[in-house]
Image (spheres, coloured by chain):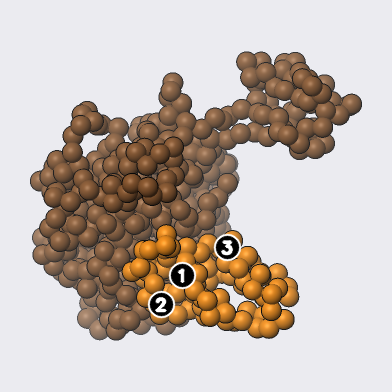
Chain colours: A brown, B orange
């Protein structure tokens, strides 16, 4: 099941981040943060869960995650949010791991089981019971019932029922995870197994209770924005995430307090050029996997080690952009702003950015500062791509298209290309097979998110609308003057 | 059937909180409704600052009347019922 880009859960998350950011901008974080759950769910207000008190308790944990804390690590329930806020301000660094589960928000979904719905007509043929290898289906008052202790979830009954009356109940987070990194514990509450997790963020999108949250870097970033000391490195997928077009988004970033804005698409130009070279020089009997999607690179490192030697060693667009940023603006913290939760791992490992924010978090900052983007004048980025072509890195197919275009400039043919558009279990198996060389050579473009970065877990714009905005950027793009 | 104007607020708050989904309205309207809708974006309608009446972004005007807390489903329903009544 796919939830809409924006829904009640994402609204609450963004609005809460907005409120938190407002307090941080006005230096009242510690004084005010413990009031926020009550202000969001005042007495006699409507509630989402059983009562406003549980809603408030969950809001408290959401605020902990927004402050960058791991909810799982809570030792003392009586501790105030103010003391967590104080710790965040003193620690002043990005949090370590990226995802955290709000155990009391987790609904402990029943799942992984087959169940008979009210559509069962108790027919005469009863193919469900006839086909069950474990004799797990019995009839009570003329309707089928599955005995859970006997059922082995083979699905035969579901496939043969002429009324589609038998369903396989899924646990949304577990079903969305391509690497089995999220699973229910004995109490039925979801838990993330860090050693397996690739931080793709699918579970955070899939959970209808929004119980999986990112540990945010909002507060340390805001502290730097207040001093006008931070560089924004914007992912190409920023197109269409906000109203008003790219030029106005850049002005809005400057209003927030970013001292410079750099297009990661400029780094992507270098990535494409070097990846094309690497392809030409590489072994010709094995595939070359693209390097820019960090969730897939994590998946390779943790689950498909045989493919690791085949992942391109070309630096990612962020790596090039981060290096340029530290050359131009030494010692000013760099903030990557993108759609991605896994980019944090990459930024930390490769030291290419000090902080990572998602578009959703950036949106909360715009709201906190009441910035009406579409009313602003347009500005130029401080570092930009030479053409719009590399902005295509934001969508599936775009990385391969850029590499192919670099090769054709050298009079070479485009490589045979395989696309893994959305890294699911099937894609992971494909990578395993590819590592053995059985599938031949060529360029393998892998995007963990189906559709590419434009559909990432940290996006706020509708993908179709965003795609139109991206095409506009690609067509109208001109490099800014001070490019070196 | 009259033709009506649907304006989706493209202020920052409305856009971020679901307004961009609403801009795909036309893909979700069936004939004959889709022929009778003129869809446009608009600068901030200035409703988002008012949190009374449990309303919230995204805001849309359908045939001159303002609606808050819109989702694609509720917008489709509203447009259809306004057109049906016209």
Residue position for label 3: B74
Kindly check if marks 2 and 3 are in contact, taking CB atoms under 8 A apart as contact.
no
Which residue matches tag 1? Answer: B59
Q: Nearer the viewer, residue A44 or A354?
A: A44
Q: CA distance from mark 1 to mark 3?
A: 12 Å
Query: Which image quarter: residue A354?
Result: bottom left
Question: Relative to residue A433, is residue B1 drawn left or right?
Answer: right
Disc number for residue B45: 2
Relative height, residue A388 to residue A336 (above, below) = below
Residue A430: percent from left, percent from top: 55, 42
Residue for point 86% across, 29% down:
A123
For marks 1 and 3 on the same chain, the one whose residue lies earlier in the sequence: 1
> Dividing the picture into quarters, in which one does residue A244 lie?
bottom left
Label 3 CA crowd tier, 10 Å (few <14, some 14–19, many 20+): few
Dot 2: few (<14), some (14–19), or many (≥20) neighbours within 10 Å? Answer: some
Q: Quadrant of residue B63?
A: bottom right
CA distance for labels 2 and 1: 8 Å
């Amino acid at each position: 099941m796919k939830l809409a880009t924006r829904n009640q859960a994402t609204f609450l998350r963004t609005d809460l981040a907005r409120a938190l950011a407002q307090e941080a901008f006005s230096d009242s974080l510690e004084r005010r943060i413990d009031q926020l759950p009550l202000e969001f769910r005042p007495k006699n207000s409507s509630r989402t869960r059983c009562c406003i008190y549980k809603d408030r308790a969950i809001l408290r944990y959401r605020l902990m995650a927004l402050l960058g804390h791991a909810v799982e690590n809570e030792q003392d329930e009586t501790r105030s949010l103010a003391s967590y806020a104080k710790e965040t301000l003193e620690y002043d660094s990005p949090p370590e791991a990226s995802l955290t589960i709000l155990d009391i928000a987790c609904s402990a979904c029943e799942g992984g089981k087959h169940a008979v719905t009210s559509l069962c007509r108790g027919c005469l043929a009863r193919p469900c019971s006839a086909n069950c290898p474990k004799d797990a289906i019995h009839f009570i008052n003329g309707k089928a019932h599955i005995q859970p202790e006997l059922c082995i979830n083979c699905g035969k009954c579901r496939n043969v029922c002429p009324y589609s009356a038998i369903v396989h109940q899924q646990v949304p987070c577990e079903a969305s995870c391509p690497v089995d990194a999220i699973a229910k514990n004995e109490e039925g509450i979801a838990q993330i197994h860090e050693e397996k997790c690739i931080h793709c963020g699918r579970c955070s999108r899939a959970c209808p209770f929004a119980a999986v949250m990112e540990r945010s870097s909002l507060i340390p970033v805001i502290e730097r924005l207040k001093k006008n000391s931070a560089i924004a490195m914007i992912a190409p997928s920023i197109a269409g995430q906000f109203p008003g077009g790219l030029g106005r988004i850049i002005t809005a970033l400057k209003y927030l307090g970013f001292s410079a804005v750099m297009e990661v698409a400029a780094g992507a130009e270098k990535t494409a050029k070097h990846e094309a070279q690497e392809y030409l020089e590489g072994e010709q009997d094995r595939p070359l996997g693209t390097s820019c999607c960090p969730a897939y690179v994590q998946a390779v490192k943790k689950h498909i080690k045989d493919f690791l030697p085949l992942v391109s060693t070309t630096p990612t667009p962020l790596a090039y952009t981060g290096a340029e940023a530290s050359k131009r603006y030494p010692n000013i913290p760099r903030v990557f702003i993108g759609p991605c939760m896994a980019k944090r791992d990459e930024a930390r490992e490769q030291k290419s950015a000090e902080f990572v924010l998602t578009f959703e978090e950036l949106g909360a900052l715009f709201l906190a500062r009441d910035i009406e983007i579409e009313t602003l004048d347009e500005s130029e980025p401080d570092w930009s791509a030479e053409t719009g072509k590399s902005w295509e890195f934001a969508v599936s197919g775009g990385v391969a298209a850029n590499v192919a275009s670099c090769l054709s400039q050298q009079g070479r043919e485009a490589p045979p290309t395989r696309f893994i558009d959305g890294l699911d279990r099937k894609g992971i198996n494909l990578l395993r097979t590819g590592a053995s060389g059985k599938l031949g050579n060529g360029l393998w473009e892998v995007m963990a998110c189906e559709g590419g970065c434009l559909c990432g877990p940290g996006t706020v714009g509708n993908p179709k609308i965003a795609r139109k905005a991206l095409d506009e950027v690609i067509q109208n793009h001109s490099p800014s003057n001070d490019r070196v | 059937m009259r033709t009506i104007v649907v304006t989706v607020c493209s202020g920052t708050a409305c856009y971020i909180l679901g307004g961009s989904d609403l801009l795909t309205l036309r893909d979700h309207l069936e004939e004959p409704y889709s022929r009778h809708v003129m869809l446009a974006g608009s600068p901030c309608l200035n409703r988002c600052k008012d949190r009374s009446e449990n309303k919230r972004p995204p805001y849309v005007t359908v045939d001159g009347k303002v609606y808050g807390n819109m989702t694609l489903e509720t917008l489709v329903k509203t447009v259809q019922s306004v057109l049906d009544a016209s």
